Every structure is written in structure tokens, then in C-alpha cells.
Amino acid sequence: MTVHFKSVAKLVGSFMMILAAAMLLPVFTGIYYGETHVITSFISVMIPCILVGFFLYYKIDASRQRFNARDGFLAVSLCWLLAAAIGALPLTISGAIPDYIEAFFEMCSGFSTTGSTILTDIEKLPKSALFWRSFSHWIGGMGIIVLAIAFLSGSGIKGQHIASAETPGPTLDKLSAKYTTTARSLYMAYLLFTGGETVLLMLGGMSFYDALVHTFGTVGTGGFSTYNDSIAHFDSPYIHWVIILFMFLCAINFNIYFIAIRQGLKTIFHDSEFKVHLMIIGSAIFLIVLNLSLNSNIFGGNGTAVVGSLLNDDPDKTLHWNSFFRLFTDSTFQAVSVMSTTGYMTSDFDLWPTFSKFVLLGLMFVGGSSASTGGGMKVGRIVVMAKLARRGLFKKTHPNSVYLIKMNGQHLRQEVATNITNFVFFYFLVLVVGTLIISINGFDVITSFSSVLTCLSNVGPGFGLVGPTMNFHIFSGFSKIILALLMIGGRLELFTLFILLSPHYWNSNKA
């Protein structure tokens, strides 16, 4: 099986035209806010992008080449890297982020829906630049090539080869016979979530601009905000709970929403991954709330007294209830934000007790569900790995027995279990090697480790010098490139990007 470069070029061409069209939104934003110099920078990138894309898509004849899985790996990797490389140009040309490497890092973080930033003062940037930065979350959330698939019917490019290389999670369920129809269905749900959250945030007092950019960061589970203190800028429990709701909804497998429409809402609770997702997030919230409640340095008071007053007739019960509700809201917000890999914040969790930080660290590994906009290893893989461990223990005492691993009542094929095991091993290998490389900067272990973990899992903030109130500006240019590639690699499930480094991939004699 050989790589069909003409087919790959054709897909890249279609993507470049879509990317150029997407830049119209920050241009309109710049026109509204009178940011002429930013408008010029976007147009100067859009025009050559359209011309090159038009040539690649319409002038290259790939009719004799059958698009295959190997082509999908190359096409998806190229498009994601080009998205960041091209998307960074307007930011550098306009002077919003003068250093191109830092702009590249920022756009890798944007398109991969990571949310890590190098900006020390976000609010100084032009609104159109901030809009583009957040809009990249929305584009990358569902998949930039899934968007292209929706427009590729009749192009000869097979959607399943693209989807298998780009869609997060161990499996991809088809909602219809054609992947173009599946892609359109997914984007329809994506648009409904986007519109719904934008309206609800505006009802909470946000301006249309703020509501839209923070919706992009929520439904894409990205986490870029237009304010230095993120969602904490909005001192509104209503806004916080609206964002909690949509972070949770978008970290769930999108396919089950369509299944629920067809077969009823109760079918959602029959899904193994969804039930485990609920169990993990519920347990994490309970443990964090309990730990913070019993810790006296939260909210400047005695946490034990707060909990006790809720059970007794205390004259300050209303005050304690308000404190506990705020604690519960912040705990829930940060747990959902981290597990969905959104990365928004309402409080500096790096100041939380060690136990609570360890709970959040565990959620960074887990991430969202398969076929969601969340990152991490995915809940589905955690479920399968737990079942494999259980089978291993069972076989120790019953070596001759047959133990079948099932998901949702269906037997899990050995090939799928092997692929999941390989992914988990490779994930930790990349995490260790990445941490060794980043440690060259000389920062402490917590900073080095969490910076790699948060980029690899597409979470955003980490701990230490890359905590929720800090940024990644401190790293060298080389380290920023490594971390940027880890973001893209993590978003593409590692193998899609790193398989290109294998000599076997480029050897046409290998199947």
C-alpha cells in the first residue's frame, strides 16, 4: 500500500479553502470593533490560502488514486499542523503575538482544544485576534477534517479513512451509511449546543461577544477566555452552572445523543462508558467538596465549622450555606472542567489541598468520553483496561476458564483490546519521554510533568509554574515547539501523528 500524494493534496486543498473562509469571522469582528491593522493581517493570509487551496483541490486530478487509510494519516496530520501554522500568521503579522513560535504554540493549543497559553496579559489583545483564538477551539473541537468531510461528498475521498485517523476514542460509530451524512449530523448537534449555550450565557448578562467566545471554549472543550482570570471574571453562579452543564454535555460521546433520540432517553443510561463517566465525575466532586470543606484555608474560614453549621441551628447558617454553595460550585466547576479537558477556572486550584489536586491530576489522565470534544485517554479506554485487569486476576485463579470482555452487552474483539492496550502504553511512554525533554528547562518536577500531561491530554492549565493563574511563556522556544506537537499528537490520539515518523509508513512494500 503506497501513499497517494495527489489524493492527500486534494484534501489539503479543500481544508485550506475552509480555513480561509473561517477567517472571515475575525475579519467581520475586526470591522465591528474598528481594528484595521488586524483585518489587513487576516486578509493577507486568506488570499494566498484560498488560491493555493483552489489550485490543489480543482487542478490536481486524483481520480485514479483510491484514498486509503495510509493517506488518511498523512492528510489529517498535515491539515492539523497547517491549521496551526497558517492560523498563527495573522497573529504575528498584526503584532498581537509578535513571536511566531509563540503564535504557533497558541494556535496549536487553540485547534487541539488544549487551552494552554503563552499570553501574560490576554486582555491587551485586539478583540478580533481573541475571537480567532477562541474560534479555533470550535473548529478543532469536532475535528477540522470532519468538517471537511461534510463537504466532500462526491470527491472520491473515503470518510472512514479520515474519521479513523482523527476522531478521538477507541471506536467510531456511524450514524448513517455515509460518513458525510454522519459528519453533518454531528455538526448539527454541535451547532445546537453552540446556539443554546450562547443564548443562555447572554441571559446571564454576558455580551454577545463574550457569550460567543466562551461558548467556543466550552463546546470545543478548549478553555481560552478573553479575560486574565478566566470564568472567575464573571462572579455569577448562573453563568458558572451554564458552563458546567455544557462542559459535561460536550465531554460525552456525541453518538449517544442520536441514539437517545431514536430509542429513548433511558438508553443513555445503558451505555457502559456513560455510566462510568458519571461515576468518576460524581466521585471526584464528592471527594473534592469533602476535602475542601474540612480544610480551614478555603475561603478564609473554618471548613469544619461550615459543614457543622449546615446540620445544626446556627445563627450564621445562611452565611455558611452561601459559603458551602460557592465551595460546591467551584469544586464541581473545576472537576468538570478538568475531566472534560476544557481548562476554564473559577478558582486557583493550585492552592487547593494536596488531596484535591491529586484528584484533579487523576481526571487529567482520564479525560472525556470517546467521540466527544474532550481529550485525555478517554473513559472508554479506562473501562476496557479495568476489565482487562479484572480478567487477568480472574485467570490467575481460574486458568482454564473462558472470560469474555463485553462493552454494552457486546463481545469486545481482541483487536480492539490490543489497540487500546497499545495506546495506553504509548501514552505513558510519550508522557515520560516528553517530561524528560521538557525537564531540560530546569523547572521543578511538578511543573515539568504537569506541563507535558496537560498538553498531551489537551487540558490546558497544569500545576506549579503552569498552574491556572500562570502560563507557558516561561519555556524556551524549543520546548514550546515540543509541547505544541504534543498537543496535536494528543488530539489525534498519538498514532496518527507519530506513525509518520516510522520508516514502515513510507515503505510502499509494507501493507
Image (cartoon, rainbow, N blue to C red):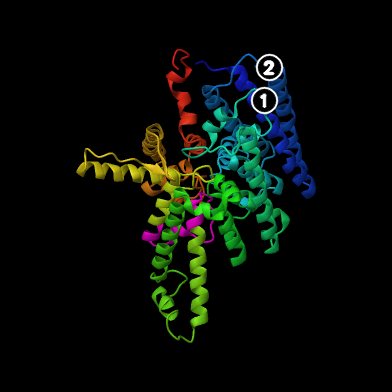
Helix, strand, or loop for circle 2?
Answer: loop
Residue 181 % position (x, y): 65, 36
**86 left or right of 114?**
right
Say above or below: 139 vs 465: above
The earlier-in-sequence mark between 2 and 1 is 1
Q: Quadrant of residue 158?
A: top right
Query: Pointer 1: residues within 10 angstroms few (<14), some, or many (20+)?
Result: many
Residue visible at 54% across and 34% down in the picture: 166
Residue placed most toward the observer, 13 or 49: 13
Whether residue 236 appears in this view of the structure is: no
Report the span colored magenta. 335-357
Helix, strand, or loop for circle 1?
Answer: helix
Whether residue 278 appears in this view of the structure is: yes
Residue visible at 40% across and 79% down in the picture: 308
The residue under label 2 is which amino acid type? Ile
Residue 431 % position (x, y): 39, 39
Residue placed most toward the observer, 90 or 70: 70
Question: Looking at the image, do the residues carrying marks 2 and 1 touch, with CB atoms under 8 Å apart?
Answer: yes
**397 left or right of 352?**
left
The residue under label 1 is which amino acid type? Gly
Q: For the residues marked 2 and 1, what is the alpha-carbon distance in whole angstroms? A: 10 Å
Circle number at residue 13: 1
Query: Pointer 2: residues within 10 angstroms few (<14), some, or many (20+)?
Result: some
Residue 27 % position (x, y): 75, 41
**501 left or right of 218?**
left
Determine if the magenta segment contains residue 125. Answer: no
Residue 193 % position (x, y): 64, 51
Determine if the magenta segment contains residue 347. Answer: yes
Q: Disc count in the image?
A: 2
Image quarter in which the C terminus is found: top left
Circle number at residue 60: 2
